[in-house]
Structures are given as C-alpha cells and as structure tokens.
Image: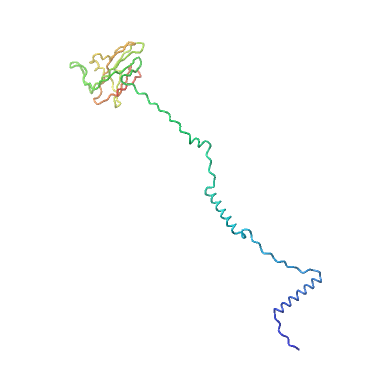
Amino acid sequence: MARSRGTDPSLQAQQADAQAQQRLAYQQAATGQQPPVLQPQPAPKKNFFARHKIITALLVVVAVVVVSQAVSGGAEPTAPAPGASDAAQAPAPDAPEVSEAPAAPGVGSPVADGKFQFTVTSIEAGVPHIGDATFGVDAQGQFLLLHVTVTNVGDAAQYFDSGSQKLLDGQGRTHSADSSAAIYLPDSNSFLTSINPGNTVEGIVVFDIPADATPASVELHDSPFSGGVSVTLT
C-alpha cells in the first residue's frame, strides 16, 4: 500500500470551498433558482461643505463681516424731523429795543402839579446866613435857595406856600423848607402867597440842609396833599 503525503491546509480549504459552491450550484439548478449576485456597495458621498472647503471658508468670512457691521452701526441714521433744519438755519428774531426812560425835567423845564406850573430857574447852595446883621438867621448847616416861577393855570386862586415843597439830597434824605428863614428874604413870595388864575409869581424857597449834603432833586406841590412833581437839580 502506497504511503500518502501530507496535504497543505490552505489547499484543503480551497478545495472544500469549491466543493461547497458546486453543491450549492447543483441545488439551485435542481430548484430553478439563480445564484444571488452580490452588488458592490457604493462609497459614501461627502457633503457639499466637505467637498468645497475653500467656498466654505469664504462664506464664513462674509458672514463674520456682515454680523460685525450690523452690530457696530449698521442701523440707518435717523432722518431729521421736518422743519428742524429750517428752524436751525432761520435767523433769530431781533431782540425788542428797550426804550430808555425819559429824562426827568431839570432846571429851566416847566412842570405842572394841580393848578400850578413851576419852573426852577436857579439854585444857590452854601449860604451860611440870611438877612442882615440886625435881623437875620444863621443856617444850621447851609442854606439852599431855590428860585422858582409859579403860574396859576387853574380857574381859581391858589396859595403858594414853601412849606409844601421838599428837597432830596444825594443820600436819599428828604428835607422840608425853612419858612421862617424865608421871612428874612425880601420878596421871597413863598409864604402863603395867593396867586390868581393866569398870574405868575417869582418866589424863593429856602432849605436848611447839612453842610456836606448835595442837592439831588426838588419835589414841588400846589398844596400839601397833592401828588407833586419832581425836578432834577444835578
């Protein structure tokens, strides 16, 4: 009996596989079935962004730019309200002119109060004594002599009296007339002098004021209770 040689295991596996396929083919032929054909599996497709990396990178850059512009000031500027620019460009209206108060009447200007029209013609200040050496009076400070013409513009007689007149100095102090001193002046015509309508009298009103006082104005009245009118003496 001949001695058998050892067989290769891989060769045996191939032979066994071939025999199995033959048996399977014989069985399918006997039953009329076709052997299954194995279709190769298609390779999985990559998505668009994986296949187009450069385009994807550009789209990312564009998206970042758009977002940054929207955040940093992409909002449209607000349109100015209608008429706002016209109002800003319109010239400012001229300021109303402030009219100066009329100057107070002074020496030489006729003024009226009640039935009398007064005109101060002159003043004498710094007079220390009125009268002569026998009959006279010394000033406590200084005498101020106010020369004034008085016209009755009413329709009835009216008394002109120096006691109704007042003088204001530069410090705002009010001084009354010194009727007793006026007695020593000839033709002072300032103590209860009656003036008929249409007549004019030249009188002198005496004031005794401090030596350092400066006369500022005089307030003239046709009677003790009239409103009075002011005349500037400076």
In what quadrant of the picture does the N terminus appear? Answer: bottom right
Q: Position of residue 178 (x, y in %)?
A: 26, 19
Residue 9 falls in image quadrant = bottom right
Q: Residue placed farthest to the front in the image? A: 54
Q: Seen in the image, is 44 located left or right of residue 73?
A: right
Judge left or right: residue 5 versus residue 232: right
Q: 133 or 93, which is in the foreground? A: 93
Along the viewing direction, whichever of 108 and 153 lies nearer the viewer:
108
| Picture coordinates of residue 125, whole percent (x, y) | 25, 22
Q: Residue furthest bottom?
A: 1
Position of 229 relative to 62 (above/below): above
Name the image colouring.
Answer: rainbow
- Residue at the far left: name it: 133
Instruction: Decide: is 171 above or below 12.
Output: above
Q: At which x and y percent is residue 154? A: 36, 12
x, y percent for residue 151:
32, 14
Residue 234 figure quarter:
top left
Q: Quadrant of residue 113?
A: top left
- Count the marks: 0
